[in-house]
Image (cartoon, rainbow, N blue to C red):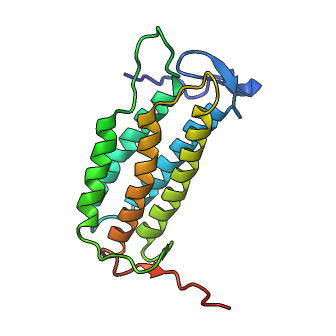
Amino acid sequence: MVVLNRIYTRTGDDGTTALGSGERRPKFDLRIAAYGTVDEANAAIGVVRLYLDAVPELDAMLGRIQNDLFDLGADLAVPQREGKAERLRILSSQVERLEHDIDQLNEKLAPLTSFVLPGGKPAAAYLHLARTICRRAERMLVELAAKPDEPVSDAAIQYMNRLSDFLFVASRTANDNGAGDVLWVPGQNR
């Protein structure tokens, strides 16, 4: 359980922050940036949910995802080390649930004939924004995992990869199941 009695501690005034292990790192450290970007994606999803009154099924899925993203932040905040007690980690079952949700939403969508431009209804546009933030977080996780002594689980990377796919399908769902999608017309403005 998390208990927050004080919001400011002043410990970060020197430009460092603590990982869940207690280790202090510069605030520009790639691990800190990665879970900060995961948090940014979560905040963007929170904005999306303001516009989903007419789509309760999608809102419920996004609520579960927001909780998963906090799990992912906790996973990244305590790097997995050999011989250390296991902490909260993203699991393959969370990736599988995303795949199930993607399939469920995708069943109702017509096949695409072009790429989709971000737009349509506000919820769809914000889902595209969340998707691009998610892709940036995924790139950071992959970069972090490529560094020696910076473990990132395969499930965490897979989760972010699948989440961006989910957010794309969700944007089409929010756009009246694709009827309101704004399609790219190659070379239209030449």
Which percent across, then down, holds residue 172?
A: 37, 70
x then y, percent, for residue 109? 28, 72
Quarter of the view holding residue 156: top left
How many labels, in total?
0
The residue depicted at 36 percent of the width and 74 percent of the height is 175
Q: Which residue is drawn at 66% across and 19% down?
A: 24
Describe residue 26's horizontal placement relative to residue 108 as left or right: right
- The answer to whether residue 126 shows anywhere in this view is yes
Q: In which quarter of the image is the C terminus?
A: bottom right
- Residue 40 higher or lower than 175, as above or below: above
Q: Is residue 51 visible?
A: no
Residue 180, image quadrant: bottom left
Q: In which quarter of the view is residue 120 placed?
A: bottom left
Q: Is 94 drawn above or below residue 166 in the view shown? A: above
Q: Check the image and name the residue furthest to the right.
A: 14
- Name the image quarter holding the N terminus: top left
Q: Where is residue 63 in the image (x, y as percent from the top left)?
A: 33, 48
Q: Residue at x 30, y 65 (%)?
A: 53
Quick check: 80 above or below 104? above
Q: Left or right of 34: which side holds 106?
A: left
Where residue 38 sits: x, y (%)?
52, 43
